[in-house]
Image: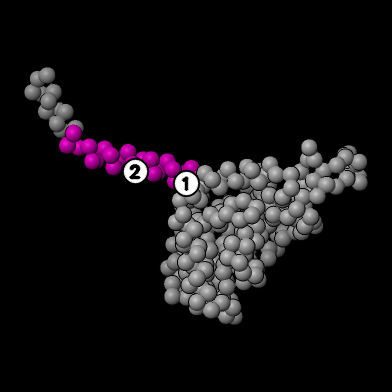
Amino acid sequence: MNNMSLGIIKGILKQWPFFLFLFAALTLILFLKSKKGKGWAGEKAVATGMWLALDSKIYRRIDDVIIYTSSGTTQTDHIVVSKYGIFVVETKNINGWMFGNAQEDQWTQSIFGNKSRFQNPLKQNYRHIKSLSEFLNIDDSLLHSVVFFIGDCTFKTPMPPNVLNSGIVPYIREFKQVILTDEQVGDITARLLSVKQDKAFTHKTHMESIKGRYASKTTCPKCGGQLLKRIAKRGAHAGASFLGCANYPRCKYVTADE
């Protein structure tokens, strides 16, 4: 190898931090442009915004918490613990027009004329509320459900006051009734931080738990209620048996009776 070739190689090696930085920057840009990346960035923006706007001496925030209950694991986007209660925040990074109400099992997104359906986030967050209530051994009246759309969306049907596409911090601040002592706030925060740091509860184990939950023939995967055998009374499947949630009509989950 001649001196010129060695010089070129040495020059490239000296520049490796730059190439490494360039590769990392390109990878980050591609990630942030992906659907998963946009969701991650949006949730981080919500978390940062709440952290900066809410007094940390009054409100304790824990993000991305996976807990295990008798009906499997559940993953909560954001939990804000305060003497005014525990705010359980479910974030949705969805754009376009939004249609739905508290009772429907699914809501509709319409964007550029294309419609798609997704699970009612209020019912999704109801499971988080029940799971946290069980885990913390407290009454679920101490928990406040909040659904926050972080995408560029417009509500085309009237939404409950706890479903927001802006103003989440003012909404949380509206709660003024003290329902938890400082000691309870500290204890609940410590328990949630402890389980968050437990490496046994990972996204992988959570996804495995979800698969197992939906395979169950005894427990409702949506609300944790008991699945009961029922007979269809009308329609194309009249006379056929199926499994339905015992919490109907609040929960309308059904599955095949096999």
Q: Main structural element of the magenta stretch: helix, strand or loop?
A: helix
Q: Which residues are the magenta region?
A: 13-37
Foreground residue, 11 or 235? 235
Q: Residue at x 46, y 61 (%)?
A: 194
Which residue in the structure is indicated by mark 2? 25
- Which picture quadrant has residue 178? bottom right
Which residue in the structure is indicated by mark 1? 37
User: Is residue 45 visible to us here?
Assistant: yes
Asked whether 30 falls inside the magenta stretch, the response is yes
Foreground residue, 158 or 245? 245
Look at label 1 and name its amino acid.
Answer: Gly
Label 1 to label 2, Cα distance in Å? 14 Å
In-image side of 176 versus 54 (left or right) = right
Q: Residue at x 88, y 45 (%)?
A: 231
In-image side of 79 versus 109 (left or right) = left
Foreground residue, 78 or 174? 78
Indicate which disc residue 213 carries.
none
Packing grade of label 1 (10 A; few <14, some 14-19, many >=20) is some
